[in-house]
Image (spheres, rainbow, N blue to C red):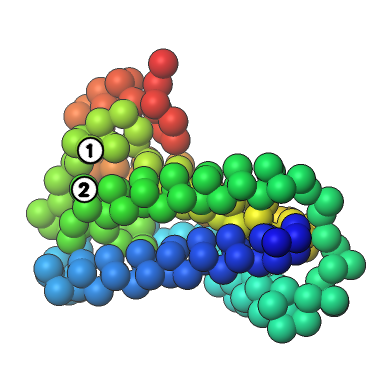
Amino acid sequence: MDQEALSRFFLGEILILFLLVRVFFTIASRVKGARKPEDVKTTVPEGKANFILRRFVLVPALSASFFFLYAHPSWMSLFSIPLHRLGIYLGAILGLCGLVLLTWVHLSLGKQWSAKLQLRNDHDLIQSGPYSRIRHPMYTALFAVYLSLGIVSTNYVILILIVAAVVSIAARIPQEEEMLIARFGEEYKKYQQSTGRLFPKL
């Protein structure tokens, strides 16, 4: 299997597994307890520019790039990254690790997971599972999967779009922490001292 075929194989596998995990836990969270308007206590609006950039620019651009990579590979070959097979394998391993962590995070959060920056009336401060060492393991997992897709694609266009998406999502973290401090106060501040934001604190 040459580099191009190996790249497309791992890219497709990781992308499909990622979508399956997201769809499964989205449905599962709704089955366990749909987030009704009256159940939500706090919602922090995301910056409009950042939201528009990610939802209406980066996501369509990435979707189009993935499509053309498979439908018209000759077009995308103009932006190929000369990456050794070992680099593709390492990128795939990073993606699989991210998917395992993402699954663990979803299992730890249960029905408290939300794609929006919001808290339920009965929201608990989860400090078990991956949250015992990392405050935002969901972002850690997403960044690992996204960067994996960028690496195994061996394509400059996709990698640049992925990095832009990671930066856009990372901009949500300070807002989320402010929301959690406002809700849990000193409890969350003590939690911050014992955990790392995206990686375990040494």
| Image quadrant in which the N terminus is located | bottom right
Tell me what residue is drawn at x 21 percent, y 67 percent. 29
Q: Residues within 10 Å of mark 1 (few under 14, many from 20)?
A: some
View extreme (front): residue: 1
Q: Earlier in the sequence, mark 2 or mark 1?
A: 2
Residue 161 showing in the rendered view: no
Which amino acid lies under the numbered mark 2 shown in the image of this protein? Ser
Q: Residues within 10 Å of mark 2 (few under 14, many from 20)?
A: some
Residue 96, placed above or below residue 181? below
Residue with the mark numbered 1: 129
Tell me what residue is drawn at x 12 percent, y 68 percent. 32
x then y, percent, for residue 158: 71, 62
Residue 174, placed above or below residue 148? above
Tell me what residue is drawn at x 61 percent, y 65 percent. 9
| Image quadrant in which the C terminus is located | top left
View extreme (bottom): residue: 71
Residue with the mark numbered 2: 108
Front-most of 88 and 110? 88
Left or right: 117 as drawn, with respect to 126 = right
x then y, percent, for residue 106: 27, 54
Residue 114, quarter of picture: bottom left
Front-most of 32 and 184? 32
